[in-house]
Image (cartoon, grey):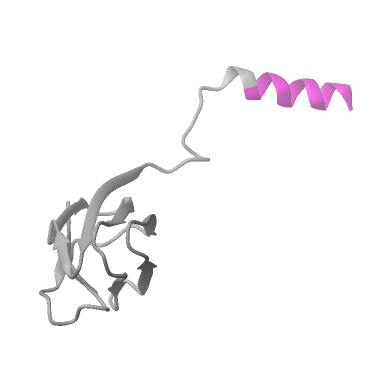
Amino acid sequence: MKTLLSFFLLVFYVLPPTRVFAAEKFTVELEMKNGDLIPRMLKVPSRTIIRIKITNTGTEPSEFESVQLRKEKVLAPGASSVLVIAPLKPGTYTFFDDFHLSFPKGEITAIE
């Protein structure tokens, strides 16, 4: 038993660290202000976990929604939150403020 434990400890300390436990994330920021999406177009790398830091700077509630990505997040005025999206294939994905449907939609473009 001691030999086996010693072997595992030796392997653990000798081998170089790997990225097995933490995948890299790409972070973008999005401001939602009474229906306006700032910026309206987000460019992200494909095949990478995406973090969107959303801040509602408006005086009304906002809801980030993307049917294609199956994501939604409701934010009270002045609130911030983070939305994590699985790695995307190259392409364009739309999102919108579900509480302000008369405003233009935004786009997330995943590029290689």
In the image, is residue 33 part of the stretch drawn in magenta?
no
Where is residue 44? Give x, y as percent: 20, 52
Residue range of the region highlighted in magenta in the rendering: 1-12
- Check the image and name the residue furthest to the front: 59
Is 5 placed above or below 67 here?
Answer: above
- Check the image and name the residue furthest to the right: 1
Residue 106 lies in quadrant: bottom left
Q: Looking at the image, which is closer to me, 40 or 86?
A: 40
Q: In the rendered view, does 106 fall on the left or right side of 15?
A: left
Q: Residue at x 53, y 40 (%)?
A: 21
Q: Looking at the image, which is closer to me, 51 or 58?
A: 58
Where is residue 55? Give x, y as percent: 29, 55
- Check the image and name the residue furthest to the bottom: 102
Q: Residue at x 28, y 69 (%)?
A: 60
Residue 79 lies in quadrant: bottom left
Where is residue 42? Give x, y as percent: 16, 56
Q: Main secondary structure of the magenta part?
A: helix
Q: Residue at x 31, y 70 (%)?
A: 61
Q: In the rendered view, does 2 fall on the left or right side of 91?
A: right
Residue 104 lies in quadrant: bottom left
In the image, is residue 8 part of the stretch drawn in magenta?
yes
Question: Quadrant where the N terminus lies?
Answer: top right
Where is residue 69? Give x, y as percent: 31, 71
Q: Residue at x 20, y 62 (%)?
A: 33
